[in-house]
Image: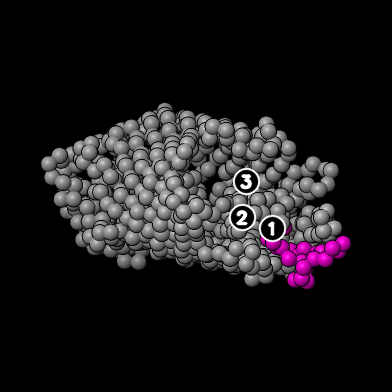
């Protein structure tokens, strides 16, 4: 395979006049603060050539935001606009990867393994991701992105716990700036740490991200380097069912099993995307007041190349194992370590829809790609350095399309693995957004369809570690998915339904071994609404869901989240305050338990989770561009008994206090031009 791919890459790099950059979904909006090409003020009755920016390569955005972010979707090879939320309503959540209105079971407050109660809120992990990393994929999954900033922009978040015995620290800094009209630079750093002696839990989370993009003439280059690290010291939860339901001793004095194990997970992602516009077109827009003609260029036909390298690893150390545990290798060694690395190379050709022309051809891009995956895990019969490496390669075809009309917007993409280890796997997804009233985009009906065939990951089929071993040829998993959502903006209501039918659904049984259900049907209905009246605001979401096979997948029949707050503005235009009560609830169900050495959730039918509300009280203050909050977590401790558990055999934290702030730094339009 490499004999054919490498010559193609060499020809591409040397023949830039024939191959090159990527076409994005639609025409980007030009920011209002763009200066003329000579840096001066445009004169009346003149023609001004606007400089190239990333807006010419990215999907349409509002153009009014100070910072634009486009997040890369690897499966569909599409960039999606993502707003940067500076609302003080959500300041106390501070982790944009978590869904605040989705109840979940977790092993700590933040940055620990978690599983959402809503099945369709759980991330669809990549096929090659080891099962031991699925529970932390929400935190650890790196993602390439591109930014455009109208002036220097940065923000800093920090949060801390009042109590020193249960300390929690969070700090995040972000900065982006356009160094030139077509050059953007951005970085993001974060450190988080929390400790909870109630369950002997200690977690750390560190990340560093660097992004850069460049547009010049017909060339476009975008790259990123992302490093994420997570560390957990866990004891595996409570051992005794007697202490789980104790009603006399306070939760903070519940005995725990001090195994003193340590888990270190890592994710690295390096992306380089470059190309060349084969065909471009120049357009004009007229300023009828100043009589200025602005000219700008947009790509029409583009060839491009992308290379991605990603690596995931997990290391588990248990220097003092509990009594009675059976080991397959040794009693004190790093035995449950796995790693997977993936190299993905794609060549593509794309046509970009031209909204200025009278032809209504959709945007279309198609590509050919190759993946090589390397898996590393312990090996049978080798005692100290017994790590085996297995490699798999696959070739695939992919395509996507975007069609934006007056009353509907269509997105679709497909991928087919034609050769190699994953031959026969495919993905076909389509989304249709209907706009009965084009001027009211919030009033729409969104319909989504997907059919997928996916071979289980190598490390799900073949595993050997110190605590577990299996070797099973699992059948490919297929599913058919449909969902629809209706948005009613005048009532701030959204109603939706989702259904997915699996064949050969993969899960881990009570013995923590991979198993498959022949047929599984999941149905979910949800209703969410927001009401605002004279300072009072309410937002809520309720989800009803069923599973046809509770032995393979158990879900709470009902999950609910609500936030009731009162907002006032003591200093108009300067200071805003909001006091809110957040509540979440789920009906009881036999939730998955967590296996610490293997790092995955598995089925159990002994302990139920749920039937207990959780209340948080939050006071938010917004002073200009700064958000400050004070929060009382688990306000209702002991109000409804002592049956509060965050996860199976992991009790919820006692009542706790936390405070923090967000500070957004940027240069307003009237003080500095965009470039």
Q: Residue at x 61, y 48 (%)?
A: 76
Q: Which residues are magenta?
A: 31-56
* CB contact under 8 Å: marks 3 and 2: no
- What is the distance, in whole Å, between disc 3 and disc 2 at their CAs? 34 Å
Q: Is residue 42 found inside the magenta-colored segment of the image?
A: yes
Identify the mark at residue 415; answer none if there is no mark.
Answer: 3
- What is the distance, in whole Å, between disc 1 and disc 2 at their CAs? 9 Å
In percent of width and height, residue 344 lies at 59, 58
* CB contact under 8 Å: marks 1 and 2: no
Q: Residue at x 42, y 54 (%)?
A: 621
In front of the other: 201 or 358: 358
User: Can residue 149 be seen here?
Assistant: yes
- What is the distance, in whole Å, between disc 1 and disc 3 at their CAs? 35 Å
Number of residues whose C-alpha sits closer than 10 Å to that of mark 2, classed few (under 14), some (14–19) or many (20 or more): some
Q: Circle 2 is placed at which residue position?
A: 65
Q: Is residue 104 positioned above or below 598 on the image?
A: above
Q: Quadrant of the N terminus?
A: bottom right
Q: Residue at x 81, y 48 (%)?
A: 356
Q: As drawn, is 5 to the left or to the right of 561?
A: right
Residue reaching furthest to the right: 45
Label the magenta part by its dominant secondary structure.
Answer: loop
Q: Residue at x 65, y 41 (%)?
A: 412
Identify the mark at residue 222; answer none if there is no mark.
Answer: none
Q: As drawn, is 498 to the left or to the right of 386?
A: right
In front of the other: 464 or 143: 143
């Amino acid at each position: 395979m490499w004999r054919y791919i490498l010559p193609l890459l060499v020809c591409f790099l040397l023949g830039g006049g024939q191959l090159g950059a990527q076409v994005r979904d639609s025409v980007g909006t030009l920011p209002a603060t763009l200066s003329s090409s000579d840096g001066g003020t445009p004169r009346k009755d003149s023609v001004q050539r606007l400089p190239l920016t990333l807006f010419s390569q990215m999907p349409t955005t509002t153009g009014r935001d100070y910072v634009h972010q486009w997040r890369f979707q690897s499966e569909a090879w599409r960039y999606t606009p993502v707003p940067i939320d500076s609302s003080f309503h959500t300041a106390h959540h501070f982790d944009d990867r978590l869904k605040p209105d989705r109840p979940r079971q977790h092993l700590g407050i933040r940055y620990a393994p978690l599983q959402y109660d809503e099945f369709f809120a759980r991330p669809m992990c990549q096929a090659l991701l080891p099962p031991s990393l699925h529970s932390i994929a929400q935190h650890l999954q790196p993602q390439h992105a591109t930014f455009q900033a109208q002036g220097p922009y940065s923000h800093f978040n920090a949060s801390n716990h009042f109590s020193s015995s249960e300390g929690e620290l969070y700090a995040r800094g972000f900065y982006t700036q356009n160094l030139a009209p077509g050059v953007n630079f951005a970085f993001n750093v974060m450190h988080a740490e929390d400790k909870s002696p109630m369950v002997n839990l200690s977690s750390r989370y560190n990340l560093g991200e660097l992004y850069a993009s460049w547009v010049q003439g017909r060339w476009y280059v975008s790259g990123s380097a992302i490093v994420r690290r997570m560390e957990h010291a866990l004891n595996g939860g409570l051992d005794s069912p007697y202490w789980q339901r104790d009603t006399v001793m306070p939760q903070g004095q519940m005995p725990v099993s001090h195994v003193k194990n340590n888990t270190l997970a890592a994710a690295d992602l390096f992306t380089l995307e470059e190309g060349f516009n084969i065909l471009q077109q120049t357009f004009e827009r007229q300023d009828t007041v100043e009589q200025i003609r602005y000219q700008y260029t947009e790509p029409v036909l583009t060839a491009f190349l992308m290379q991605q390298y990603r690596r995931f690893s997990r290391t588990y150390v248990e220097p003092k194992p509990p009594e009675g545990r059976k080991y397959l290798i040794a009693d004190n060694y790093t035995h449950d370590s796995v790693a997977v690395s993936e190299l993905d190379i794609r060549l593509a050709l794309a046509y970009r829809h031209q909204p200025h022309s009278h032809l209504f051809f959709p945007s279309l891009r198609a590509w050919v790609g190759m993946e090589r995956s390397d898996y590393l895990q312990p090996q049978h019969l080798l005692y100290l350095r017994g790590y085996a490496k297995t490699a798999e390669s696959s070739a695939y075809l992919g395509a996507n399309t975007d069609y934006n009309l007056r009353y509907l917007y269509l997105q679709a993409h497909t991928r087919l693995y034609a050769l190699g280890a994953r031959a026969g796997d495919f993905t076909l997804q389509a989304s249709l957004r209907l706009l009965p009233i084009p001027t009211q985009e919030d009033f729409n009906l969104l319909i989504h369809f997907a059919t997928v065939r996916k071979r289980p990951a190598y490390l799900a089929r073949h595993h050997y570690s110190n605590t577990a071993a299996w070797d099973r040829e699992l059948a490919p998993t297929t599913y058919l998915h449909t969902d629809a959502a209706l948005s009613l903006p005048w009532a701030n209501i959204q109603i939706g339904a989702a259904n997915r039918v699996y064949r050969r659904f993969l899960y881990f049984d009570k013995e923590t071994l991979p198993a498959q259900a022949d047929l599984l049907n999941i149905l979910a209905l949800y209703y969410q609404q927001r009401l605002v009246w004279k300072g009072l605001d309410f937002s809520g979401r309720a989800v009803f869901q069923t599973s046809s096979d509770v032995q393979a997948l158990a879900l709470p029949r009902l999950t609910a989240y609500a936030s009731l707050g009162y907002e006032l503005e003591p200093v108009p235009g300067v200071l805003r305050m909001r006091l809110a009560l957040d509540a979440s609830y789920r009906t009881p169900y036999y939730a998955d338990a967590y296996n610490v050495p293997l790092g995955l959730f598995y089925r159990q039918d002994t302990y139920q989770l749920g039937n207990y509300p959780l209340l948080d009280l939050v006071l938010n203050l917004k002073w200009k561009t700064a958000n400050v909050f004070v929060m009382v977590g688990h306000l209702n401790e002991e109000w409804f008994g002592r049956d509060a558990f965050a996860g199976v055999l992991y009790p919820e934290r006692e009542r706790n206090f936390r405070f923090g702030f967000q500070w957004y730094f940027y240069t307003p339009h009237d003080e500095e031009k965009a470039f």
